[in-house]
Amino acid sequence: MSDTLYKLFLIGAGGFAGSVFRYLASGWVQGVSGNVGFPYGTFAVNLLGCFVIGFLSYLADARGVFSADARAFVFIGVLGGFTTFSTFGNETMNLFRDGENTYALLNAGGQVVIGLLLVWVGRSAAFLIWR
């Protein structure tokens, strides 16, 4: 098996596991909250993912705990399947850490504002097509 194919397998397997964990954790939190008016499950999963990627990225960067394959499995696969919000948070924090404050603010603001705008555009497009 080629290195690329092996890495894709690791990412896919991790993504499967992360997605299942997200479904279970989000559903559990939402059920425990007893509230259907606010997405507590997604909120909790996103925050937990940010904590976990922060914790593990320190171990990876400062302690060299993860091999390249383990990083692909855990960071891209598991945490990517669990929540891409954690990757967004980690990449933005890395920009701040590297002194790229303008890029960090553009990344954070742009993804939130433009992302919300594009959700609206996508919904509007679908409405116009299938009304």
Image (spheres, helix red, strand yellow):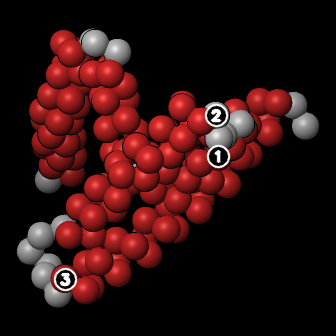
Question: Image quarter for residue 119?
Answer: top left
Relative to 32, does residue 129 appear above or below in the rendering? above
Q: Amino acid at mark 1?
A: Phe
Q: Which residue is mark 2?
A: 64
| Residues at discs 3 and 1 in contact (Cβ within 8 Å) | no
Relative to 2, does residue 54 appear above or below in the rendering? below
**Label number found at residue 2:** none
SS at mark 1 in the image: helix
Q: Amino acid at mark 3?
A: Ser
Q: Position of residue 76 (x, y in %)?
A: 55, 41
The structure residue drawn at horizontal position 40% and vertical position 43%, both measured from the top left corner, is 54
SS at mark 3 in the image: helix
Q: Which residue is mark 1?
A: 73
Q: Residue furthest front?
A: 63
Q: Nearer the viewer, residue 48 or 3?
A: 48
Q: Is residue 105 visible?
A: yes
Q: Position of residue 110 (x, y in %)?
A: 18, 25
Q: Amino acid at mark 2?
A: Gly
**Label number found at residue 33:** 3
